[in-house]
Amino acid sequence: MKPVITTRRIYEGPETNDGCRILVDRLWPRGVTKEKAALTEWAKYLAPSTELRKWYDHSAELWPEFQKKYLEELKANSNVAAFVNTYKREKHITLLYSVKSPDHNHALVLKLLLEQKM
């Protein structure tokens, strides 16, 4: 059975149904302590490259192109397969991100890819 994968802002705090809480940002979110984050893992190796993140700069106009470029990075990232193997038997995975937009963030792209691979 595939895990249910959801995305949430890390600033929302933990919920009882989060399952494995995985932070997928390259940078640690400001104002969040490790205790408050209640993480299973900080998977910064799954985050967009620094170059891609700076290029995108959370611009809604660049969202379609960002998705393509980030998927290319993920497909070339050998850590994705290891992540899938580690978490494929979990019931629920919550991918955590720090940006403000719930509709334009890299965790959504990662979620779709992981759902295909799991």
Image (spheres, rainbow, N blue to C red):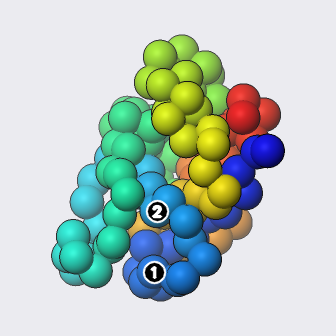
Is 38 situated above or below 60?
A: below
Q: Secondary structure at mark 2?
A: strand
The picture places residue 39, in percent across and down from the top left corner, at 35, 63
Q: Which mark is residue 92?
A: none
Q: Is residue 117 visible?
A: yes
The quadrant the C terminus occupies is: top right
Specify few, some or many for label 2: CA neighbours under 10 Å numbering under 14, 14-19, or 20 or more.
many
Residue at position x 35%, y 52% in the image: 41
* Quadrant hosting residue 6: bottom right
Q: Amino acid at mark 2?
A: Arg
Place of residue 110 in the rendered image (x, y in percent of width and height, measured from the top left): 62, 43
Q: Is residue 105 visible?
A: no
So how many labels did they put on this image? 2
Asked whether, in this view, residue 76 is left or right of residue 60, the answer is left
Estimate the spatial distance between the alpha carbons at disc 1 and disc 2, rounded to whole Å.
Answer: 8 Å
Which label was assigned to residue 21? Answer: 2
Query: Label 1 amino acid?
Result: Pro
Which element is circle 1 on? loop
Residue 14 disc label: 1
Image x and y of residue 116, in percent? 78, 34
Residue in the picture at 50% in, 35% down: 86
* Residue at point 61%, 50% (across, down): 90
- Of the numbered discs 1 and 2, the one sitting upstream in the chain is 1
Tags 1 and 2 in contact by the CB under 8 Å rule? yes
Q: Quadrant of residue 66?
A: top right
